[in-house]
Image (cartoon, coloured by chain):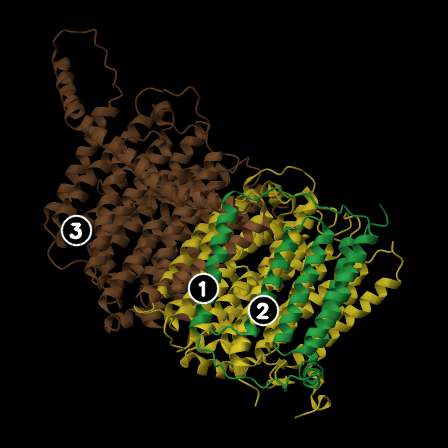
Chain colours: A yellow, B brown, C green
């Protein structure tokens, strides 16, 4: 066996950078005068993320590498997801700059390094082939976000949101651990690849129900973390109570990391259950049906309940549930473009959702609440912002030339080509997707109508800070650009070696 | 010139961007000028392109690879063929005239620049739709025109009806769009390409199973039904009249709503390969035609009458296409675009004159004071009625011939009756507005020149477009079908009595309308009881009138009222019922969201148990 | 199932663990809660002994039952607290019923699956789970998650401070 020093630890440079900067900031925070403004922490945060992006970029095109029996591994799968997480967090950090001026007792110093730690957790979740590391990463992300959600100490909704998040998140973690312990008991290993082999054997020797039970328990927890129905109930309350940049973080980064985790665990460790693992009571289609059920249910529930929302933040929360259902579809249908279509949608979702939440944050700061009526007449107060918001909403709704349209289209294609009269569920899910997409126009257009067809409540223009303006601009360009020229990113995604994520390093 | 066809849509887009960027900086005149110039350039190039297609044989297609999709690549580009070129000219010309006209109609509106930005954006989208060489690109523009239509219907957003109408239009057309979208995906799945050529090639090579062709064709038709306001997705179109009149003329009469008919024509080889699909198109079209015409008879809003008339005429086009009358359908699309735009613009002029009065019961007698508008409107009416030599006569006659030759007598009869009804409702409108005494209280004001000359120009095609049919040796239909492999019309010799019958019925319709509404003497003085020759004549006329009233008029009116009731209650009821279903679901969902973490955990747990049991139950017992 | 001394001990210990957990949830005084928790954790240490994981059992007693519980008690006694917590508004009427149904069904499913699974009944060699092996596993193979856990603890600490700290400026 190799000794620790034999491994090439430089591959961990991105994580080490983030962890190091988080530690550095926590120390600086201690030595600064308590009343000193800590807004400038954004800059070191951005520098750390930028450096990490640089380090991740150097891994481009390199073969997969693992350290210590896959407790850490870099492959193209990890590469893509880390990029999404890093860029997303950078944007969140930028919109946070100065966003909490009016909050009394807001621990702004802690805010930035907790953000980094949460990011670190997410990154760990994307690049490991071992259940223990994955779980620690998940908890790192979860605990950091529990605190971030509750940071607006004066706001009762924020406290309540943090509390619910902790309790329900704890329940979810418990289910995941329970399921994982079943798996370990069955296979005697926490390594996903070893697990895959032994699970294959276990399925044919009478342990199949036990394995399925582990899957169902884990699905409970994962469903919670990615916020799909019926494990979505915490989402609206928590999203509404959290500070808006953190809501964006939850909706984008947390969700993406959880999807990475889910893909990794289901496509390697649980693979025998999804492919050809026949058994006495449940057959191999059950795994797909389970995911299909959750996807369909999320789309329907998210859309239907969103129709009744009068609060833009809750509305976006429900919409994110519906979107999570859409993202689940490729995994559930198992089409030929599983990875590219999921990642493409996630990239689009990143920019679109971040952009929408940024605008929402500005509105909230301006009107003091996030009611739909606060959007009234935005087109006259801030035409460019309103235009950008309209584009984000169109993209979420899936109207052409936006990234959202192409993402949905790609996923639908993927679902339909895998369908056949025997796999009619694929058609069903495609139908649900179309139906809910149409229904979702009602509420997305509700906001657009507010912005364009209602007179404004106040005359003066909307104050848009430079940081927020930049984020909106980037999101706008990405939403439109990726929709107009998907080839660029699809080319990158198509050339990646997805198979490397699914097999042990040679 | 065809090599530059791809840049035709770009000029309006450029204008739209310019106007959006600096909406506040431009004065009304400058804004109007920028938009009009851009559309004018597009129109000029379009005409050049059309001229070229008279000589070239094959369609010219320009592709750029957009993205690769597995081993398939998707392209964007521009295609020019005869049908495209014709549509390009129609769209850009009507759009140009409407752009100019709007300068007068919208004068005084503070958001003139925004209006022109939307209008240009629409023109861009519509031209892009027409020029698309593949189904996916068409779908993208198809959505875009929908969004533009939404923005323009709701342009006067301070009117609640306008807001409602905008939303209704968007949602109802979206239902159709979903059908089209499924068709797009199914086509790609079956053919492996979005290109029209590849699709047609696959169909002629029998690569697609016939049931699948039928399904695809029907789904495409669902898209067309939504866009073209065919039954049962028609009810947004009359409501859309809440938008400014130039918008109604351009989008909801001449171009966008005709996109449905265009789509069916464009995808005609798919339809031609399935008798079921063709039959559906024909019957839906025929039913819509007669249904909308009856409703048009009892409306009192000048624009709504024209809107129902549009629905009805679009039904005619579908009837033609469904009866394999490819050329007839396109021909009617062409003539309809000109005379319906003319009618709408003239109606807009009347509305402007009467300070936004739209109720025809408060108009009347305008012929005396507004002879000029009267003539323009009359030309439009004669064209739609189908009185030779106006254009409607020729295209309608071809449609009826196609219906006759396709062997469906019932459809032919429906078409014939609709021709009579068309004459009736449109001349009812004309007589009530222009004849009789002035019932309005407001004195008409003058309308600006910039609104007049676009209408004058539109009279040229409204009168002359029909003579396309007289180009020797089937020139028009030969040109249109050249190289496409589509039959111009069903086989067979057209009976000579059809045009005569059409003409007679149309004249009858006009006559009845004259007797009922036109004589200006609906209230004949009754003091003179002496039997004189004149009076006798009048009595006899009254007799006709009574016959009309009790024999045809009353039952007819009841039928109309019944149909409008069905339209309003049942169809809208279903639509709003679906909405209510969603609302109820949302209410239950929100109820469960009671803010208690215990409930949330409980719901998740129960969800898990139900999912486990649900997915495995069949196995436990089976 | 053969009743042995081991299985009796297991049942007693697990009942104590579950009972302690339930008492903690239902107690109204904070001190009672801490004591129930300590009780529950102690019973789990007993189960570890049954599983031949003596080291783990000792650690469990030392850290959880000893250090953590004592620390909590100190914390409670040294800070001013409403020692009792008033009852929250009770959830809806059908809650207990549905909760029972859900938990019962889940329990039934899990038990059903466990009983259907043919576990091999051979004695595992427990010698390999020695202290040395544990140390090697933690500090060699699982060093990355181990280090990450330290960050996790730090974050939890910071978070607790932020959320609990009274504002200096108020």
Q: CA distance from mark 3 to mark 1?
A: 67 Å
Residue annotated with mark 3: B403
Residue C88 lies, with reference to residue B437, above or below; the image says below
Q: Secondary structure at mark 2?
A: helix
* Residue A256 shows in this picture: no
Disc 2: CA contacts within 10 A as few (<14), some (14-19) or many (>=20):
some
Q: For this view, does A280 lie left or right of residue B352?
A: left
Of the residues tagged 3 and 1, which is closer to the observer?
1
Residue extending farthest bottom? A1
Q: For this view, does A34 lie left or right of residue B483?
A: right
Report in which chain the residue with disc 2 lies: A
Task: Please tell me which residue is depicted at 17% across the width and 22% down the height of the picture.
Answer: B545
Of the residues tagged 1 and 2, which is closer to the observer?
1
Report in which chain the residue with disc 3 lies: B
Q: Position of residue A205 (x, y in %)?
A: 41, 81
Task: Please tell me which residue is depicted at 30% across the width and 39% down the height of the picture.
Answer: B309
Disc 1: CA contacts within 10 A as few (<14), some (14-19) or many (>=20):
some
Residue annotated with mark 2: A177
Q: Are marks 3 and 1 on the same chain?
A: no
């Amino acid at each position: 066996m190799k000794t620790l020093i034999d491994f090439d630890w430089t591959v961990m440079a991105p994580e080490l950078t983030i962890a190091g900067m988080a530690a550095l900031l926590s120390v600086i925070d201690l030595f600064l005068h308590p009343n000193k403004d800590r807004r400038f922490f954004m800059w070191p945060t951005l520098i750390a993320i930028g450096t990490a992006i640089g380090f991740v970029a150097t891994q481009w095109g390199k073969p997969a590498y693992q350290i210590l029996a896959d407790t850490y591994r870099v492959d193209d799968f990890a590469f893509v997801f880390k990029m999404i997480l890093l860029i997303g967090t950078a944007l969140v950090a930028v919109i946070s700059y100065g966003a909490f001026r009016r909050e009394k007792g807001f621990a702004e110093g802690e805010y930035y390094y907790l953000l980094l730690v949460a990011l670190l957790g997410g990154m760990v979740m994307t690049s490991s082939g071992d259940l223990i590391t994955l779980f620690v990463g998940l908890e790192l992300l979860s605990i950091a976000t529990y605190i971030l959600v509750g940071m607006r100490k004066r706001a009762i909704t924020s406290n309540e949101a943090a509390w619910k998040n902790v309790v329900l998140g704890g329940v979810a973690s418990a289910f995941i651990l329970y399921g994982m312990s079943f798996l370990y008991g069955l296979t005697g290993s926490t390594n996903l690849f070893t697990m895959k082999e032994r699970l294959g054997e276990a399925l044919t020797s009478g342990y199949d129900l036990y394995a399925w039970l582990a899957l169902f328990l884990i699905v409970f927890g994962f469903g919670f973390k990615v916020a799909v129905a019926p494990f979505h109930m915490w989402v609206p309350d928590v999203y509404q109570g959290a500070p808006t940049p953190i809501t964006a973080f939850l909706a984008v980064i947390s969700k993406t990391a959880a999807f990475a985790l889910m893909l990794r665990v289901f496509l390697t460790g649980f693979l025998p259950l999804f492919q050809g693992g026949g058994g006495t009571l449940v057959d191999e289609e059950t795994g797909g049906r389970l995911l299909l059920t959750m996807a369909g249910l999320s789309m329907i529930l998210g859309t239907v309940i969103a129709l009744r929302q009068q609060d833009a933040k809750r509305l976006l929360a429900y919409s994110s549930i519906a979107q999570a259902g859409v993202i689940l579809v490729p995994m559930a249908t198992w089409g030929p473009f599983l990875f590219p279509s999921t990642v493409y949608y996630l990239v689009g979702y990143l920019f679109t959702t971040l952009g929408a939440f940024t605008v929402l944050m500005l509105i909230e700061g301006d009107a003091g609440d996030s009611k739909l009526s606060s959007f009234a007449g935005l087109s006259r107060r801030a035409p460019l912002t309103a235009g950008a918001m309209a584009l984000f909403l169109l993209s979420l709704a899936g109207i052409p030339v936006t990234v959202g349209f192409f993402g949905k289209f790609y996923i639908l294609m993927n679902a339909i080509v895998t369908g056949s009269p025997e796999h009619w569920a694929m058609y069903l899910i495609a139908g649900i997707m179309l139906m809910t997409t149409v229904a979702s126009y009602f509420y997305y257009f509700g906001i657009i109508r507010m912005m364009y067809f209602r007179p404004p409540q106040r005359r003066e223009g909307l104050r848009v800070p430079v940081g927020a303006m930049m984020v909106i601009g980037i999101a706008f360009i990405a939403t439109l650009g990726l929709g107009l020229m998907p080839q660029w990113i699809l080319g990158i995604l198509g050339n990646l070696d997805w198979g490397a994520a699914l097999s042990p390093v040679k | 010139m065809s090599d530059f066809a791809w840049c035709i849509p770009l000029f309006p887009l450029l204008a739209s961007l310019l106007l959006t960027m600096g909406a506040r900086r431009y004065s009304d005149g400058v804004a109007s000028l920028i938009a009009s110039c851009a559309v004018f350039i597009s129109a000029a190039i379009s005409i050049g392109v059309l001229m070229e297609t008279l000589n070239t044989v094959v369609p010219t297609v320009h592709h750029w690879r957009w993205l690769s999709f597995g081993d398939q690549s998707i392209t964007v580009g521009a295609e020019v063929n005869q049908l495209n070129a014709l549509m390009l000219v129609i769209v850009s010309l009507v759009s140009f005239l409407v752009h100019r006209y709007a300068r007068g109609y919208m004068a005084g509106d503070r958001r003139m620049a925004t209006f022109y930005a939307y209008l240009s954006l629409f023109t861009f989208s519509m031209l892009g739709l027409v020029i698309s060489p593949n189904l996916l690109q068409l779908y993208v523009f198809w959505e875009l025109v929908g969004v533009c239509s939404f923005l323009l219907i709701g342009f006067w957003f301070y009117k609640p009806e306008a807001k409602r109408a905008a939303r209704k239009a968007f949602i109802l057309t979206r239902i159709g769009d979903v059908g089209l979208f499924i068709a797009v995906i199914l086509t790609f799945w079956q053919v492996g390409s979005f290109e029209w050529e590849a699709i047609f090639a696959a169909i002629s090579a029998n690569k697609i199973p016939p049931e699948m062709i039928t399904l695809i064709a029907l789904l495409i038709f669902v898209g067309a039904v939504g866009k073209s306001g065919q039954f049962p997705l028609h009810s947004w179109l009359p409501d859309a009249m809440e938008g400014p009149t130039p918008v109604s003329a351009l989008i909801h009469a001449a171009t966008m709503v005709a996109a449905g008919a265009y789509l069916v024509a464009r995808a005609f080889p798919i339809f031609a390969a399935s008798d079921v699909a063709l039959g559906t198109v024909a019957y839906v079209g025929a039913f819509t035609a007669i249904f909308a015409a009856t409703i048009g008879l009892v409306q009192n809003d000048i624009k709504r009458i024209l809107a129902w008339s549009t629905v009805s005429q679009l039904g005619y086009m579908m009837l033609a296409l469904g009866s394999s009358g490819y050329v007839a359908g396109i021909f009617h699309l062409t003539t309809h675009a000109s005379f319906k735009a003319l009618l709408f613009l003239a109606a807009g002029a009347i509305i402007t004159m009467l300070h936004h009065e739209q109720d025809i019961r408060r108009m009347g007698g305008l012929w005396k004071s507004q002879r000029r508008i009267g003539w323009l409107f009359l030309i439009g009416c004669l064209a739609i009625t189908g009185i030779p030599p106006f254009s409607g006569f020729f295209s309608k006659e071809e449609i009826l011939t196609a219906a006759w030759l396709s062997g469906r007598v019932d459809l032919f009869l429906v078409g014939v009756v609709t021709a009579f009804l068309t004459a009736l409702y449109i001349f009812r409108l004309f007589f009530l507005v222009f004849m009789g005494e002035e019932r309005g209280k407001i004195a008409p004001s003058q309308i600006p020149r910039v609104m007049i000359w676009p209408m004058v120009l539109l009279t040229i095609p409204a009168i002359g477009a029909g003579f396309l049919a007289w180009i020797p040796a089937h020139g028009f239909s030969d040109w249109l079908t050249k190289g496409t492999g589509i039959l111009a019309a069903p086989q067979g010799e057209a009976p000579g009595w059809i045009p005569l019958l059409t003409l007679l019925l149309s004249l009858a319709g006009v006559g009845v309308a004259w007797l009922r509404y036109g004589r200006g003497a609906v209230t004949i003085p009754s003091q003179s009881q002496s039997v004189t020759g004149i009076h006798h004549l009048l009595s006899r006329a009254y007799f006709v009138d009574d016959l009309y009233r009790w024999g045809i008029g009353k039952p007819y009116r009841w039928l109309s009222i019944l149909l409008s009731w069905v339209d309003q209650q049942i169809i809208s009821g279903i639509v709003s019922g679906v909405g209510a279903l969603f609302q109820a679901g949302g209410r239950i969902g929100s109820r469960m969201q009671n803010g208690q973490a215990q409930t949330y955990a409980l719901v998740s747990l129960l969800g898990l148990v139900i999912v486990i049991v649900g997915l495995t139950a069949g196995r436990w017992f089976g | 199932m053969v009743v042995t001394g081991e299985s009796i001990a297991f049942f007693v210990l697990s009942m104590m663990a579950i009972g302690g957990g339930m008492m903690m949830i239902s107690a109204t005084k904070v001190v009672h809660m801490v004591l129930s928790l300590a009780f529950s954790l102690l019973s789990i240490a007993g189960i570890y002994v049954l599983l031949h994981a003596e080291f783990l059992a000792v650690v469990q007693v030392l850290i959880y039952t000893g250090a953590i519980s004592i620390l909590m008690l100190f914390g409670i006694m040294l800070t001013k607290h409403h020692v009792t917590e008033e009852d929250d508004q009770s959830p809806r009427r059908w809650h207990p019923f549905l909760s029972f149904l859900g938990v019962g069904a889940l329990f039934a499913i899990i038990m059903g699956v466990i009983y259907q699974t043919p576990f091999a009944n051979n004695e595992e060699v427990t010698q390999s789970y020695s202290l040395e092996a544990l140390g090697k596993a933690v500090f060699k193979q699982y060093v990355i998650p181990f280090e990450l856990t330290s960050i996790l603890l730090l974050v939890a600490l910071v978070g607790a401070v932020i959320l609990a700290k009274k504002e200096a400026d108020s």
